[in-house]
Amino acid sequence: MADPEAIKRALSNLIDNAAEAMIGSLLREVHIETRRSEQSPGMIEMVVADTGPGVTDDMRERLFLPYFSTKQRGTGLGLSIAAKIMQDHQGTIRAEKNMPTGARFLLELPTAAP
């Protein structure tokens, strides 16, 4: 029931950010995972995790605001667009620390009604 182009754009923004964040890292890995949520029945989880420098607590509070960017060339719109897409699909997005290093973005979307 989701708009596939919108979901593709949200994931593309996260993957592009992950790739750019890892430019200075010795280990450069992006992991993408989809699964049914164990914590929230009726939800699907998509995870995009990288081995870049990660996000601080201060950054995490502002990541999804329009025009907030940690990059010199960034417009600060990629994550706010991803958040809007998730909201339009009655879903959520949040950033977490990836262990041992990097950032982890968790997207949750409701499954289609049977």
Image: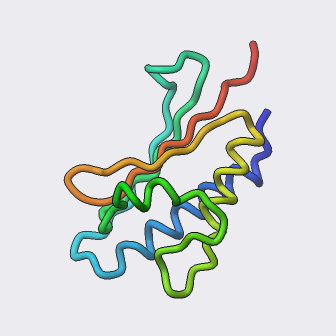
Q: Please, which colouring scheme is shown?
A: rainbow
The answer to whether 84 appears left or right of 95 in the picture is right
- The front one of 12 and 81 is 81
Give the answer, above or below, for where 22 lies relative to 7. below
* Quarter occupied by residue 77: bottom right
Report the residue at 32% width, 67% height from top.
52
The answer to whether 46 appears left or right of 54 in the picture is right
Residue at the limit of the structure toward the top, as seen here: 114
Report the residue at 52% width, 20% height from top.
40
Residue at the limit of the structure toward the bottom, as seen here: 73
Image x and y of residue 68, in percent: 57, 70
Q: Quadrant of the C terminus?
A: top right
The answer to whether 65 appears left or right of 25 in the picture is right
- The front one of 14 and 29 is 14
The answer to whether 107 appears left or right of 50 in the picture is right
Image x and y of residue 74, in percent: 57, 80
Image x and y of residue 24, in percent: 30, 81
Tally the numbered discs: 0
* Quarter occupied by residue 108: top right
Image x and y of residue 73, in percent: 55, 86
- The front one of 64 and 28 is 64
Give the answer, above or below, for where 1 lies relative to 21. above
Q: Quadrant of the N terminus?
A: top right
Report the residue at 63% width, 33% height from top.
109
Report the residue at 75% width, 47% height from top.
4
- The front one of 3 and 75 is 75
